Amino acid sequence: MKLKRTPLIATAVSAFLGAGLLNTLVTGPHYMDQYPRALGGNATENLSPDQLLVTIAGFREMVAGILWVRADSFFEEGNYDAILPIIRLVTWLDPRQLDVYATGMWHMAYNFTDEESRSDRRYIPSAVALGREGSQNNDYTYELFFETGWLFYHKIDDDYGQAVKWWEAAHTKKDMQTARRNILAMAYMRNGQLNDTTRLYRDLLTEAEEAFEGDNVFTNRQNRDTLESNYDNHLMRMVQRGNFAQERGDFDQGLYDTKPPFDVRFSARVTVTDSKVLQVEGTWGVQPVGSRIRMVLRDKDFPNALPAQMVWDQADRVDLDPPKDITWVQDGLFVRNQRFNRRIDLSRDPTMYPFRSENYIIEFYYNPRSAPPHIQDKFGFNGEGMTDQNFLNTEIRPGTRVLYATLEITRDQLLRRGQYALDRETPIVQTKNFVAPSGAAVNDVLEVPGIRSAQPEQPQARPERPRIPPTRTAPTSTGR
Amino acid sequence: MNVILSIAKTTVGEAIRRRVLLVILLIGVLFLVIAPGLQTLSARQNFAVLTSFALGIIQLTSAVIAIVLTVYMIPNEIERRTIYTILSKPVQRWQFILGKYFGAIAALAMMMALMSVAFFAVFYIVQPEARSQIGNIAKGPMMFFVQMSLLAAVAMLFSTFVAPIVNMFLSGGVYLVGTLFNAVFQTISENDQLPGLVKGAAGVIYTVVPNFGQFNISNPLINPGTEIKGETLFFVQLAGYAILYITVALIIAVIVFDRREV
């Protein structure tokens, strides 16, 4: 049978058009839907042709594995800068590598530090973006939702509503670990959702009791006991701090630990002792150990800045190289003997602290929701038991009474230039109520019972310590 | 039809006897056997790494076999002058082309089946907890077979008018572009900064060059939580796309071969 050419050509043209339409309109788009995408672009963006080749030729998981092994060796060598591009590449090649996403977030948020171990917080928005991308690409598991929530809860340690959001999402996943479900209750607490904390603890305890009744193993017992303890503590604190009374409306009638509010008598002074070297000192009238005042020094026009924080989830894509012309310094001022005094040397990290802007803000911030329990017992969950004549703020964190003070400082002052050069004039900025302490040196020793008080090199000119209980020292005789 | 079947059978026999194909096949099987050694690359994703690597090996080996098998098919017949003995019988040229093509894909199917069996045997041994996944993973090689059938048709089309070595590079290049271009096209089409001319050219290439990339369904097979929406329909659509394109390639091959002096 001899074929006729014209029908053949017509058939070929029809088939070609059909194939083209099928590919363009149906199968091609449908196929691409199967692949997860990187934030801010598609999965192939920024890959070189050879990387693209191996990616799409079917070996992406293998190449991702090899690259991750290489990144591990960089970790061991301390070559942190080399790790970020590999992390990004691995997550492009294989967006299912949960460990790489989690490690990448941690690495960006925690490991880029200055000489005094302060994190470079300009990386945090990118770390959050990486967590968002990872959780979108792996929404079948709780893991990256949990890790992103942890970033807000632990590293950012503010903006607890975000931690709640991410951990509530983690709770909806089937594989959420029992031991980790507990922590959502803590996030609720720090976000001021006390009744949600109560409800969650109660639900988890009920589940734990049922699990223990069903299988009397150690882990079930331990989980039940932990939840029981947490639940008891929470209820006890709500009673003692007057939260139930507040709900009932009879808070004014009872004697609660948070009454009357304690005046923390905050004051601060910042002295620029040398170019980019600050001496930060001040008062915080809380005797027990454990207070840490957050200090932020930033460009006055820092993009997306909020009081004592920035919009942490501002990045819509993962940026391995955050803007290097903006400055954000964040530190915790540890309080001892009702004072803080810290030298902050920013001169050794010019890339982290470029000081390009002309004007800066120094913020002091204390949020009772982040306080340790023994201090929170007085201050309350929401700062009901805390006040300050000058710097109490009820607006910047709605629903919470926080301490917030700001000072302004110029670039010339920070860099000791112009009129501040060569010790002509020492730049000092301070709150109006700051009073320089007398006999400051001796107060630098922590006045609480402990091993330090038994050391022989204690200062001799120790002032009276009438309110401190006698120090327990180790027996000096050998007979007992 | 009997004529086509006879030529196909002969072609299968020739393919099995060709040492170069057997060597390629052997290398592929060896890689599949050592694949479990790569599981250590990822602490928690042994399944993904093993499956991804094995499917990649099956795809790559099959592509090499498909090209090597088809590029020599017609030129060898002409060079050895065996084609005269065939065409002097009551065999039309289109029957010869179709017979050769079906013989090639039958041989390809056998070799791919052998590799798949080797992979599943390895998988069965080293991934006992995921044995139930084998049926699902088998969809990967099946779609690769459709992909290779398309590649064989393209290579056969080129073999009617270019020399084998040239054809090898030509078919390999088309396969490469057809595999990579799916993702590249998307990047180009979504980039607002590119001029319209570039986007238009990309659209033409996307339409003309066979889209081999979409037959690789490894991603949903490997990764939990990813699935193809309307899987059966998608597979049917892919098969339909392949059949249409194979039809085009074979018709052009028949027309070209029909006019060629041998």
Image (cartoon, helix red, strand yellow):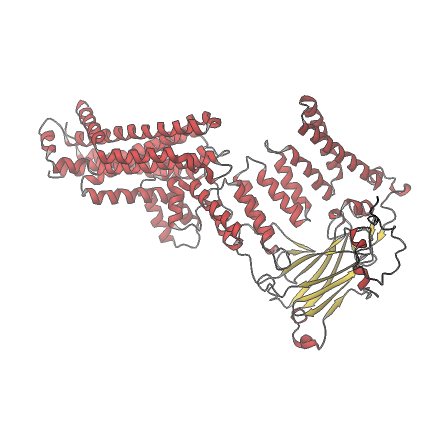
A414, B180: nearer the viewer: A414
Residue visible at 44% across and 40% down in the picture: A61
- State left or right for residue A310 relative to residue A234: left
| Quadrant in which residue A141 is drawn | top right
User: Residue reaching furthest front?
Assistant: A479
* Quarter of the image that includes the N terminus of chain A: top left
Quadrant of res A282: bottom right
Q: Quadrant for the C terminus of chain A, please.
A: top right
Q: Nearer the viewer, residue A478 or B107?
A: A478
Measured as percent of width and height from the top left, residue A55 is found at 41, 43
Q: Position of residue A303 (x, y in %)?
A: 61, 58
Q: Is the residue A286 above or below the residue B153 in the image?
A: below
Residue located 38% across and 43% down the image: B182
The answer to whether residue B244 of the structure is visible from this angle is: no
Left or right: B69 as drawn, with respect to A394: left
Describe residue B139's horizontal placement relative to residue A318 as left or right.
left
Does A402 appear above or below A422? above
On the image, the x and y values in percent for residue A431 come to 78, 64
Disc tally is 0
Q: Is residue A176 above or below residue A84?
A: above
Q: Position of residue A388 (x, y in %)?
A: 82, 55
Residue B22 visible to an observer of this rendering: yes
